[in-house]
Each structure stands twice: as structure tokens, then as C-alpha cells.
């Protein structure tokens, strides 16, 4: 019995131990699998992120082209030039097209003599799942898939000719081509016209400089990776691509050197001096490629066979076998893809900041340009009235001192008018000779008995008439200032710049109003002068004898001889005193009249008559006033498109995981 119980417990203990060991083993195995899966997941996530980065730039590049941003001399903020890109540069006989076709694995580029590539070709390669069909799409034909790549070549030629014609001209407007294939890496390349040294028949003499200028606009960008294509059977020192890349990238940090036609070098020679960086060192290693020959192309040797032959060439070559794993078009594509991904990830935060800054700038300009005009007549009238009020506010701001110019009106009254009054020729007019002449003429055949009243009145009336000149000059001076303020206000009313027809009408209406105000002011101001000669202030002269008794000429002297020089001198002195009093009166009243009739009315009703005219206009007449300046309308459309592009790019960037 004892042994049975002992055996029973022993069996239980052994069973428990077996379970524990088994569980521990399974846990260890599970943990190992989890770690392994986590590492694989991380690698997959990283690959997905990198693919999404190139895809991100691809989408932004396509949006740039659709919305008219492809760099150059654009006056708007450009996003195209900020995007990382791989630009293919080479001479016409460097094998540039063959390199691109080798990377893609398809024969699709136009061929021929002279300049074949006449527009930038943005080639976006997107890797698909194995077994999927290869096809191509053009941005300008978004719903059409090309599975026949000979038709891709024809479409490139046709689309090029649609802009440049068949006269071998070039255009900076890019063609966007996307190729979807399981045999490519995720990569975007920009193929540019081949550099040339002479213009061929049918090309303008400027074609050499035009091509170089276009290429420079791409390769000078700090975010541009330069793929410099050079033929191995030419001296590296004469390479157009290397020469240009050395100028824009002297350190070689952005340049990838590609050596073509290694299989066509003379027997007994090799390109190791270049490929190993001894002849011309770059920051990145040189890559040699072997493309299809013209005979291969004529025999329709496909790209798969060409790639196999390329691998065999480097593997079997005595000169290059030690570099075989870093040679060939397949290695070049992977190298460029990896570097482009890294560059995008590094530069994208800065690009995001640039995008946000550009959005702020474009929105500010759009606010300044104003919204598009509505189409119904009620909205037209409302818009016109709002624009007139905007002008009126600016004009009043000038008068009130918020803007410069209104102070010049005060200067007319404080400086110009007093100066003009002081310069009136009263010294000549009230000279003894002229006073004697006027008094004698006023007396006629019968001399005056006591005081020459007729002479006094005639002298005063003529003297007061001299004040008409300064009075009119003050009216005209203020009128000129008001006209200048109208001109300034029109120029400073930003909203009106959009509508030159309305601006001209407001200018006409405002100036016509100022002319009416001037005429009213002139009439009123000259009436003040005329009133001074119409009624002479008698009390002024009644006080004169009293003044004489206080220190002037004794009254008895006046009765001694009414035609002596002393008598005429006294008359001139009395009239001079009176005219001085009138001058002070007019110096104060002329500004009041001018301000009341011109400045005050301009503030109150400069456009009132125009408002009446607006109320009588028909719909088509109102619409005609809002004929916008075509340049501004075009500018607004450009800004709207560019803003749409930048906001779309911002959304695209925000959608990518940067972890």
C-alpha cells in the first residue's frame, strides 16, 4: 500500500515537471519568434516608409506639373526646385538614353540623331508585386495605360512635338511618365536634353546655350542628385557632364559618375583609373555600365538578355571582376534609390517649413489681390460702392493727417498766401506820384473842398482789387493739392488696382467734383475781396484825425494846401493803413472760404455725383466697370493654383509616417 501511494505521488511530480519544462521550452521558442517577427516587421516598415517617401515626392512632382510649377524664372514661390531629384546629364553621344532604358529594363525612349530629348522627362519608377503586368502612364493621359512600350516612345515624341514643333526647339515644360513594374526599384529620374557644342541644321544658334541654361536650372539646386553620364572611350577631361557638375558641385557630394561603353574601349586599355577614383574623385563611387550596342538594338535584343550579358561582362573581365558587385545598371538603380530615399528623409523637414512659409506668402498676396468678382448686377453695384468707399477712406486719411499730403494745404495758408500778400505792389501803387494822379483824376474839373473822398474810394477800390490774385492763387494751389491727393489715394487703394476701368472712372468723377468745388470756392473767395471794396469801413478813417492829434500832422496843416506833397503823403499813408487792415482780414477769411468750399466739400461729397450716376447704370455698364486688369486676374489664378499645390504637398507630407 505504501509503495502504491509513493508511486502515485512520484508519477504526479514527474508529470508536473514535464509540463513545466515543455511550457518553458515553448515560451523560449515563442519569444524567439516574436523577436524575429519584430525585426522583420521593422524592416518591412522601413521599406514601406522609404517607398512612401519616393512616392510622396512623385505625387508632389506630378502636382507641380499639373499646376504649372516647374521651376525656371517663376515669380511665385516654387516647390519644384526644392524637391530632391536625380537628374541625368550627359552629352548627346554619351549613352544617356541607354542607361535609362537599362535601369527600367524596357526599350521606350525616342532615338535618332541630334537632339532627341527636347523636353525634360520626369521618369517615375514604381515597383509592383512579382507577377504583375508592366505598364506605363503619362500625366497628360491619366486614364490610359500603355503596355506596349513602343507606343510609349511614340507618345513621348508626339507630346514633345505638340509644344516644340518639329523644328528641334526645346521646352522647359516636363513630360511625366510613370512606369509600374516588378523589375524596377522605386526611383525618380529626370532626363534632360543632351549637352551639345554646335547647332545642327534647323536649330536656332542659341540652342547650345539654351540647353545648358535648362540643365543648369536643375543641377544648381542643392537638393539635386547629378547623374553624370560619360563615355569610357573619351577623355574624362572633355566630358560635358563632368565639366558642368564640377562647376555646380565642386566637392562632388551631389554627383554620381556613370561610365558607359566600357566594352567599346580599345583592346589593352581599361577605365580603372576613373572607376577607382584615381583620375577624378567623387564623393560617391563611380559605376560602370555596359549597354546594348546599336547592333543589339537592331537585333531586338531584350533588356533581360542585355542585363545578363552586362553581369557576365563584369564577372568575366580580368580588369573589372574585382568590382563586379558594384558595377552594372541594376546596381546603379539600387544605389540611386537608396541615396534618393536618404536625401528625401533628410531634407523633407526643411521642405515642410518652406511649404508653410510659401503658403503664408501666397495667402497674403491673394488677400491683397482680392476675391473674384461675382456675376450678378447687385453684387457688382455692391462691389463698386465698397471700392469707392475704400478710396474715400484713403483720401480722407490724407486730409486728416493719417497719411502725408494734407499738411500742404495748411502750408498754402501759412506760407504761400502771406508771402503773396506781402509781394503785392502797394508801394508802387500808393507812391506820391500815383496818389496825386488818381486824386487829380477823381476831382475832375472841380477840386475837392475838404477831403478827396472820390480819390480815396478810387484808390481803395483799385488797391483792394490787387487781392484777387492771391485769393485765386490760394484756390488753385489747394485745388492742385487735392488733385494730387486723389491721384495718390487711387494709387494707394489696393483694391482698385484690380479694376483699371473703375479706377479711371473714379478718378474722372473725383476730379470733376474738385473742378466744381474750385469754381464755387473761387466765386466765394473773390466775393470776399469784392465785399472789401464794396463797403469801406468808415470808422477807420474817422479815427485818423484823433491819431494825428496824438503825434501826427496837425489838423490845421490839412487846410493850408490840399495839393502839397505832404498832403498826398498823408493820403497814401492813410490808405496804406487801411489796405493793411484789409490784408489781415483777407488773410484770415480766404483760408476759411477755401476750406469751406473745397476741402470740406471734398471730404463730404467728392463722389456723391458719381453715386447718382451709378444708380442710373444698367447691369452691363456696371459689369464693364469691373473689367479686371488681365495681368492681375492671371496673377490670382496663378496664386490659387500655387496655393493649391502647396497645401496638397503639405497634406501629402503630413500623411507620411516619419518614425
Image (cartoon, rainbow, N blue to C red):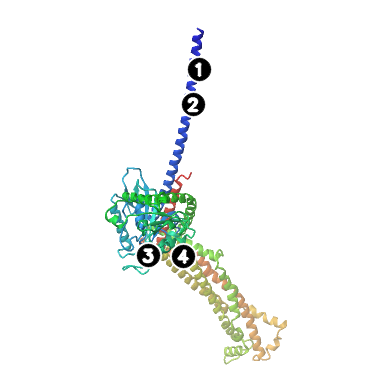
Q: Residues within 10 Å of mark 4 (few under 14, many from 20)?
A: many
Res 607 label: 4
Specify whether 11 is left or right of 425.
left
Q: Residues within 10 Å of mark 3 (few under 14, many from 20)?
A: some
Q: How many marks?
A: 4
Answer above or below: position of 422 versus 391.
below
Residue 435: give x, y in percent of width and height: 61, 88
Residue 23: give x, y in percent of width and height: 47, 25
Q: Residues within 10 Å of mark 1 (few under 14, many from 20)?
A: few
- The residues bearing labels 1 and 4 have C-alpha atoms spaced at a distance of 109 Å
Give the residue at mark 1.
Answer: 13
Give the residue at mark 2.
Answer: 24
* SS label for mark 2: helix
| Residue 96 showing in the rendered view | yes
* SS label for mark 1: helix
Residue 347: give x, y in percent of width and height: 48, 52
Give the residue at mark 3.
Answer: 196
- The residues bearing labels 2 and 3 have C-alpha atoms spaced at a distance of 73 Å
Ranked by sequence position, the earlier of labels 4 and 3 is 3
* SS label for mark 4: loop
Amino acid at each position: 500500500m505504501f509503495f502504491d501511494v509513493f508511486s502515485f505521488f512520484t508519477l504526479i511530480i514527474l508529470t508536473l515537471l514535464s509540463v513545466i519544462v515543455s511550457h518553458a521550452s515553448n515560451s523560449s521558442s515563442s519569444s524567439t519568434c516574436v523577436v524575429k517577427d519584430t525585426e522583420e516587421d521593422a524592416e518591412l516598415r522601413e521599406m514601406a516608409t522609404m517607398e512612401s517617401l519616393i512616392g510622396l515626392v512623385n505625387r508632389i512632382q506630378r502636382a507641380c506639373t499639373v499646376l504649372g510649377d516647374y521651376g525656371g524664372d517663376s515669380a511665385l514661390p516654387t516647390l519644384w526646385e526644392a524637391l530632391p531629384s536625380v537628374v541625368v546629364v550627359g552629352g548627346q553621344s554619351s549613352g544617356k538614353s541607354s542607361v535609362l532604358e537599362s535601369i527600367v529594363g524596357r526599350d521606350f525612349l525616342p532615338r535618332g540623331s541630334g537632339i532627341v530629348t527636347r523636353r525634360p522627362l520626369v521618369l517615375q519608377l514604381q515597383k509592383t508585386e512579382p507577377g504583375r503586368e508592366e505598364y506605363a502612364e503619362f500625366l497628360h493621359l491619366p486614364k490610359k495605360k500603355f503596355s506596349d512600350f513602343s507606343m510609349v516612345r511614340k507618345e513621348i515624341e508626339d507630346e514633345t512635338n505638340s509644344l516644340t514643333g518639329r523644328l528641334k526647339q526645346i521646352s522647359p515644360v516636363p513630360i511625366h511618365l510613370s512606369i509600374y513594374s516588378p523589375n524596377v526599384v522605386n526611383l525618380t529620374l529626370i532626363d534632360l536634353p543632351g549637352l551639345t557644342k554646335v547647332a545642327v541644321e534647323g536649330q536656332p544658334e542659341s540652342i547650345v546655350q539654351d540647353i545648358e541654361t535648362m540643365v543648369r536650372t536643375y543641377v544648381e539646386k542643392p537638393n539635386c542628385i547629378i547623374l553624370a553620364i560619360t563615355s569610357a572611350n573619351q577623355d574624362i577631361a572633355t566630358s560635358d557632364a563632368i565639366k558642368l557638375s564640377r562647376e555646380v558641385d565642386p566637392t562632388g557630394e551631389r554627383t554620381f559618375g556613370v561610365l558607359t561603353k566600357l566594352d567599346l574601349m580599345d583592346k589593352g586599355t581599361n577605365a580603372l583609373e576613373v572607376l577607382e577614383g584615381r583620375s577624378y574623385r567623387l564623393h560617391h563611387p563611380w559605376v560602370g555600365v555596359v549597354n546594348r550596342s546599336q547592333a543589339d538594338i537592331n537585333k531586338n535584343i531584350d533588356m533581360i538578355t542585355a542585363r545578363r550579358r552586362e553581369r557576365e561582362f563584369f564577372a568575366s573581365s580580368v580588369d573589372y571582376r574585382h568590382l563586379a558587385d558594384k558595377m552594372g545598371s541594376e546596381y546603379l538603380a539600387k544605389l540611386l534609390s537608396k541615396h534618393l530615399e536618404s536625401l528625401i528623409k533628410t531634407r523633407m523637414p526643411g521642405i515642410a517649413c518652406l511649404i508653410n512659409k510659401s503658403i503664408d506668402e501666397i495667402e497674403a498676396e491673394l488677400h491683397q489681390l482680392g476675391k473674384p468678382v461675382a456675376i450678378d448686377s447687385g453684387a457688382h453695384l455692391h462691389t463698386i460702392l465698397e471700392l469707392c468707399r475704400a478710396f474715400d477712406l484713403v483720401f480722407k486719411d490724407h486730409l486728416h493727417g493719417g497719411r502725408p499730403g494734407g499738411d500742404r494745404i495748411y502750408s498754402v495758408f501759412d506760407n504761400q498766401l502771406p508771402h503773396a500778400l506781402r509781394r503785392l505792389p502797394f508801394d508802387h501803387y500808393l507812391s506820391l506820384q500815383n496818389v496825386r494822379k488818381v486824386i487829380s483824376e477823381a476831382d475832375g474839373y472841380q477840386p475837392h473842398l475838404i477831403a478827396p473822398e472820390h480819390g480815396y474810394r478810387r484808390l481803395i477800390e483799385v488797391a483792394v482789387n490787387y487781392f484777387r490774385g492771391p485769393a485765386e492763387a490760394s484756390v488753385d494751389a489747394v485745388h492742385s493739392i487735392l488733385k494730387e491727393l486723389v491721384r495718390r489715394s487711387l494709387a494707394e487703394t489696393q483694391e482698385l488696382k484690380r479694376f483699371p476701368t473703375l479706377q479711371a472712372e473714379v478718378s474722372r468723377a473725383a476730379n470733376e467734383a474738385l473742378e466744381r468745388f474750385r469754381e464755387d470756392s473761387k466765386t466765394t473767395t473773390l466775393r470776399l475781396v469784392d465785399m472789401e471794396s464794396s463797403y469801406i469801413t468808415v470808422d477807420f478813417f474817422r479815427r485818423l484825425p484823433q491819431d494825428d492829434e496824438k503825434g501826427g500832422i496837425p489838423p490845421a496843416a490839412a487846410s493850408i494846401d490840399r495839393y502839397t506833397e505832404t498832403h498826398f503823403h498823408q493820403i497814401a499813408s492813410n490808405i496804406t493803413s487801411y489796405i493793411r487792415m484789409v490784408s489781415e482780414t483777407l488773410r484770415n477769411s480766404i483760408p476759411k472760404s477755401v476750406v469751406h468750399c473745397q476741402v470740406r466739400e471734398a471730404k463730404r461729397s467728392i463722389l456723391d455725383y458719381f453715386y447718382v450716376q451709378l444708380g442710373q447704370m444698367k447691369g452691363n455698364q456696371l459689369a464693364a466697370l469691373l473689367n479686371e486688369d488681365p495681368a492681375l486676374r492671371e496673377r490670382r489664378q496663378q496664386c490659387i493654383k500655387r496655393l493649391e499645390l502647396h497645401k496638397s504637398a503639405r497634406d501629402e507630407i503630413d500623411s507620411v509616417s516619419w518614425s
